[in-house]
């Protein structure tokens, strides 16, 4: 193994001197004070000649041998000398030696290897009979390697700053001060997820996993997931002592892996959650049931045994941490059975059920497996700690707390509640940990600033709160300022949280940016101070932000900010005028600032009369720097962005597509005829340049499309299932969503549903009226469901559109499809759903749209995560007696929830009227709904009624239909023509008074036309 040498930037750091003693002082966990240290420095090499040999023992393991090779190789690179590696018995009496490994020499110095932990290392200077020696030893499997790395990084000055860059100082004369240190990484399980990808198209793709795994190994990123996921190359990682993967069956959401509902639910529904009086197979387990606990105890023992057999066969250390984590659904109470409710009421929190359960498992295994720690993962509905329970000593609380402000440390007042909550967990746990996401936005704009300062501070805070497990996701290297600086400094802090992160930042800047370092230091300090000074609370992370912020919600991202950053970058570029790695690294930071300016353009232009930027020049520079950055990865076998091996988006498009989008954006456009009467200020016009940002690879050339390109969502046809590929496939649903407004992961405002048989497939684009949104903002996106195995998402999130948050808009989508209509599809051809344009028209102006061109079905599901399960806004209940009416998770239709109407008394009735939907008089409307009539003799009914402008019902009902009673989900369909005075339509779901019974409804929707082939779609 050798580090990747694609880089021409091997930095020379002649002038960098390490204050070795003070670095070591901060690392010291144990110093043997009884052994006197030699008085003089240990001379490794002088004037380019080796002055010491490297001595090894015959029984060294593979990782220890590799550590020795690493030491010899890099001492050679630094000093220019060649270092001999000899057996320790062959060291001559008068030769200074570095003894590496579990050597006899080290044992002779009193080091007891059996007392050293897996990653614990010792470095000690020894003055033996007038001849100096240095020993580097450690535990197995990684202690010796970590000792060597400690020596190379902090005594010699070698650093591996990213998977493509190693930094090697030139020190022909190299001496190290006397030392005696023993330490190990502060977090036993630590890992930063890799965000450097592969593509099978890259001719050097087979190199990439190896060099990435090597980079992770030598930066002590021991990983938390399976080896394969974290590095893409288990074998390479193993060569360097492996990692710290979690035990079987998985790292997250694994209750159903322990106890699959398919295996147990039918015979034992009581093993699963009781919700609203019914056992549900899709939420959580029944935590208090003794048989459930017995199953888990047995399975846990099986998993541990299997893992040990496997680890033994692979000569790896077995896993020590076993996660038991709730399923990823968020019911208010996990299980409402008597046993669970008793615990819930005592502990006042769902976490009480989890902790009580896992404590029981922990007591069961602790005598047989004293080295195993079970891990509970409190998050979302279990984040609140239990009132009285403490975690057993062999249980860790791995806390997923995601609601704070990640651009500030946990100790900042913005994060007070978050830190208090973590403290409460810490007070009841011997071991804690976090799975964190550093502060970024997944889509659209990222703040052009490094976020390592809060991350570094938080690592220290967690360490002080018994932290032993730390997982950090740092995604989107292609969109984040100072990406590898963030990753590298975080890794060093995970190793030793007590060091000063500012010194690590300096080390990185000097090594990575050379003469530009002082200017980038100013950039970082200015950006950090500006953010620190601002009052704004900034979203916690990319997964669960409080709410996606508007880019213009952050007033500090203003002209002054971008101007100052530009000045620092100008000075940095001037300091390294060449084409070397330093210059490229500086241009890469320019890329991030340019991108932010381009995305912010409208906002900046609205705020500043004469914007002192040349847009065209910035676009050109963005394009050139982006291509350079991408190519640098590509030439080393990597792909910029991406994650694991299978993640093969052609990321090249990211830069190319964005650059062309930035240059296209804002050009004047022709409007389609139907929209001819609308003023440009009354609409937002999105074509490919504006929806190019989330998944740019899906913007494709398309001759039929407006502007020659369109968003393409392609799904391969699978020949094996072609026969029924289009049978029973759902309609295509196009919905308007708010993106990730946690805890409501998806809330659909409105959607249309188009049966596949209605798709024209004539090669042309057609307009569809999707519905209305209460306002346009950063969160808005289209979600397209119905393609096999795919939910496509088309966000419009990247460009600032200030001032429209509370202005209602109607939304029109221009779409075409291929091979999705079963009557027209060509066998074996991929399905294509293409969108070339989306128009948001202010509702006040939408009357001018010729609606004849915009056809579609407006519909509602109940798939939102309301707290109180109330009816949607505007719905009305009519009833006699006390029927049960509400949105429920029981027997849902295709969405997670449905509308439930249950009449429990004879001769009583219940009806629910939907909110009025605005319609056009004279047109025909088709209503469809899914229903499930569970226990009726007389059929429930559905009506549609039209209303005039005063809200008066126009009698009689336009149409009514009976639900047949079949004991499964069916569709009902009815239609009517709107009378001349009609302005709105409502649906009524009605349960008749003649009997008692239960009916569920889901997916109500209207189509502005007669129902296609009524009765049979
Ligand atoms: Zn229960």
Image (tube, rainbow, N blue to C red):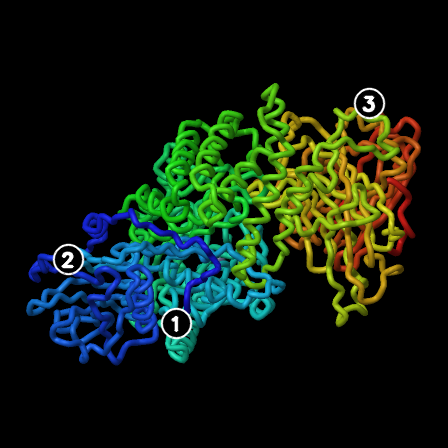
What label sits on residue 650 in the rendered view? none
Answer with mark 3 or mark 1, whichever residue precedes in sequence. 1
What label sits on residue 41 in the rendered view? 2
Answer with mark 3 or mark 2, whichever residue precedes in sequence. 2
Label 3 to label 2, Cα distance in Å? 94 Å
Label 3 to label 1, Cα distance in Å? 78 Å
Label 1 to label 2, Cα distance in Å? 32 Å
Q: Nearer the viewer, residue 3 or 428?
A: 3
Q: Is residue 63 visible?
A: yes
Q: Nearer the viewer, residue 942 or 453?
A: 453
The x, y position of residue 344, in whole percent, is: 43, 50
Tell me if mark 1 has few (under 14), some (14-19) or many (20+) residues whose alpha carbon lies within 10 angstroms of its own: many
SS type, badge 2: loop
Q: Residue at x 15, y 67 (%)?
A: 133
The x, y position of residue 628, in whole percent, is: 56, 49
Tell me if mark 3 has few (under 14), some (14-19) or many (20+) residues whose alpha carbon lies within 10 angstroms of its own: few
Dot in front, 3 or 1: 1
Q: Which residue is mark 3?
A: 950
**Residue furthest toward the top?**
609
Q: Is residue 339 visible?
A: no
Dot in front, 3 or 2: 2
Q: Which residue is mark 1?
A: 239
Q: Quadrant of the C terminus?
A: bottom right
Vertical side of 660 occupied by 187: above or below: below
Vertical side of 602 occupied by 22: above or below: below
- The image quadrant of residue 242 is bottom left
- The image quadrant of residue 909 is top right
SS type, badge 1: helix
Answer with mark 1 or mark 2, whichever residue precedes in sequence. 2
Label 2 residue near ligand 1, CB within 8 Å: no
């Amino acid at each position: 193994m050798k580090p990747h040498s694609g880089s021409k930037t091997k930095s020379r750091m002649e002038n960098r001197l390490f204050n070795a003693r003070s670095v070591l002082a901060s690392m010291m966990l144990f110093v043997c004070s009884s052994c006197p240290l030699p008085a003089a420095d240990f001379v490794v090499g002088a004037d380019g000649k080796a002055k010491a040999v490297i001595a090894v023992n015959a029984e060294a393991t593979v990782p220890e041998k590799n550590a020795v090779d690493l030491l010899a190789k890099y001492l050679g690179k630094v000093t220019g000398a060649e270092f001999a590696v000899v057996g320790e018995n062959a060291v001559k009496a008068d030769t200074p030696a570095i003894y590496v490994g579990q050597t006899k020499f080290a044992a002779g110095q009193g080091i007891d290897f059996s007392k050293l932990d897996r990653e614990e290392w010792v470095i000690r200077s020894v003055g033996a009979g007038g001849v100096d020696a240095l020993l580097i030893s450690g535990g197995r499997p990684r202690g010796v390697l970590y000792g060597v790395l400690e020596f190379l990084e902090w005594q010699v000055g070698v650093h591996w700053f990213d998977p493509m860059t190693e930094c090697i100082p030139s020190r022909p004369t190299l001496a190290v001060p006397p030392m005696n240190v023993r330490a190990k990484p502060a977090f036993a399980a630590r890992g930063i997820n890799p965000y450097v990808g592969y593509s099978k198209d890259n001719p050097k793709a087979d190199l990439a996993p190896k060099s990435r795994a090597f980079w992770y190994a030598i930066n002590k990123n021991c990983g938390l997931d399976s080896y394969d996921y974290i590095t893409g190359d288990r074998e390479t990682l193993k060569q360097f002592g492996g990692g710290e993967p979690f035990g079987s069956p998985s790292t997250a959401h694994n209750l159903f892996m322990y106890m699959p509902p398919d295996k147990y639910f039918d015979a034992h529904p009581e093993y699963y959650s009781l919700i609203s009086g019914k056992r549900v197979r899709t939420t959580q387990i029944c935590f208090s049931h003794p048989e459930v606990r017995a199953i888990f105890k047995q399975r846990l023992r099986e998993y541990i045994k299997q893992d040990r057999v496997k680890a033994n066969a692979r000569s790896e250390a077995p896993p020590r941490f076993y996660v038991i984590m709730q399923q990823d659904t968020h019911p208010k109470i996990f299980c409402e059975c008597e046993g669970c409710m008793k615990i819930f009421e005592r502990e006042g929190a769902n976490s009480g059920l989890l902790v009580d359960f896992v404590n029981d498992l922990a007591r069961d295994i602790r005598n047989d497996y004293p080295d195993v720690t079970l891990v509970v993962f409190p998050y979302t509905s279990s984040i609140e700690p239990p009132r009285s329970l403490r975690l057993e000593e062999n249980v860790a609380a791995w806390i997923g707390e995601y609601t704070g402000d990640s651009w500030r440390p946990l100790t900042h007042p913005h994060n007070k509640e978050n830190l208090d909550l973590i403290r409460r967990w810490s007070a009841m746990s011997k071991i804690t940990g976090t799975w964190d996401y550093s502060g970024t936005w997944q889509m659209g704009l990222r703040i052009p600033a490094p976020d390592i300062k809060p991350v570094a501070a938080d690592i220290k805070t967690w360490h002080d709160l018994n932290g032993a497990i730390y997982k950090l996701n740092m995604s989107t290297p292609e969109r984040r300022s100072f990406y590898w600086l963030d990753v590298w400094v975080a890794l060093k802090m995970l190793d030793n949280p007590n060091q000063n992160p500012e010194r690590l930042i300096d080390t990185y800047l000097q090594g990575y940016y050379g003469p530009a370092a002082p200017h980038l230091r100013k950039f970082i300090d200015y950006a950090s101070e500006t953010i620190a000074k601002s009052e704004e609370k900034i979203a916690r992370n990319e997964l669960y932000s409080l709410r996606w912020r508007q880019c213009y919600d952050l007033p500090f991202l203003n002209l002054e900010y971008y101007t100052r950053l530009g000045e620092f970058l100008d000075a940095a570029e001037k300091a390294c005028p060449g084409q070397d790695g330093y210059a490229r690294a500086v241009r890469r930071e320019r890329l991030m600032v340019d991108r932010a300016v381009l995305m912010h353009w409208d906002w900046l232009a609205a705020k500043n009369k004469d914007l002192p930027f040349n847009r065209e020049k910035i676009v050109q520079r963005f394009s050139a720097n982006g291509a350079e950055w991408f190519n640098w990865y590509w030439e080393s076998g990597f792909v910029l962005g991406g994650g694991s091996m299978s993640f093969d988006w052609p990321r090249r498009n990211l830069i190319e597509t964005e650059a062309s989008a930035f240059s296209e954006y804002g050009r004047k456009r022709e409007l389609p005829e139907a929209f001819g009467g609308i003023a440009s200020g009354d609409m937002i016009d999105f074509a490919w340049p504006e929806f190019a940002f989330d998944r740019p690879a899906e913007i494709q050339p398309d001759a039929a499309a407006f502007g020659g390109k369109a968003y393409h969502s392609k799904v391969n046809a699978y020949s094996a299932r072609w026969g029924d590929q289009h049978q029973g496939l759902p309609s295509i649903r196009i919905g308007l969503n708010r993106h990730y407004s946690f805890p409501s992961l998806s809330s659909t405002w409105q959607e249309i549903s188009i049966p596949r048989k209605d798709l024209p497939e004539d090669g042309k684009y057609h307009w569809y009226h999707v519905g209305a949104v209460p306002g346009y903002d950063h969160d808005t996106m289209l979600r397209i469901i119905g393609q096999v195995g795919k939910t496509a998402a088309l966000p419009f999130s990247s460009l600032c559109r200030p001032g429209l948050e509370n202005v209602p808009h109607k939304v029109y989508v221009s779409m075409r499809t291929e091979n999705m209509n079963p009557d027209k599809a060509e066998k074996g051809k991929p399905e294509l759903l293409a969108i070339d344009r989306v128009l948001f028209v202010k509702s006040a102006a939408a009357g001018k749209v010729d609606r004849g061109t915009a056809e579609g079905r407006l519909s509602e599901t109940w798939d939102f995560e309301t707290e109180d399960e109330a009816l949607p806004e505007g719905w009305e209940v009519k009833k006699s007696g006390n029927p049960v009416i509400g949105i429920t998770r029981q027997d849902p239709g295709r969405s997670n929830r449905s509308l439930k109407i249950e009449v429990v008394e004879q001769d009583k009735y219940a009806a629910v009227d939907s909110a009025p939907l605005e319609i056009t008089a004279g047109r025909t409307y088709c209503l469809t709904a899914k229903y499930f009539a569970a226990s009726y003799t007389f059929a429930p009914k559905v009506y549609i009624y039209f209303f005039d402008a005063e809200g008066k019902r126009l009698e009689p009902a336009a149409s009514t239909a009976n639900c047949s009673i079949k004991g499964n989900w069916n569709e009902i369909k009815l239609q009517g023509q709107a009378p001349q005075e009609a302005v709105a339509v409502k649906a009524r779901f009605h349960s008749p008074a003649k009997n008692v019974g239960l009916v569920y409804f889901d997916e109500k929707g209207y189509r502005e036309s007669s129902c296609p082939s009524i009765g049979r779609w």
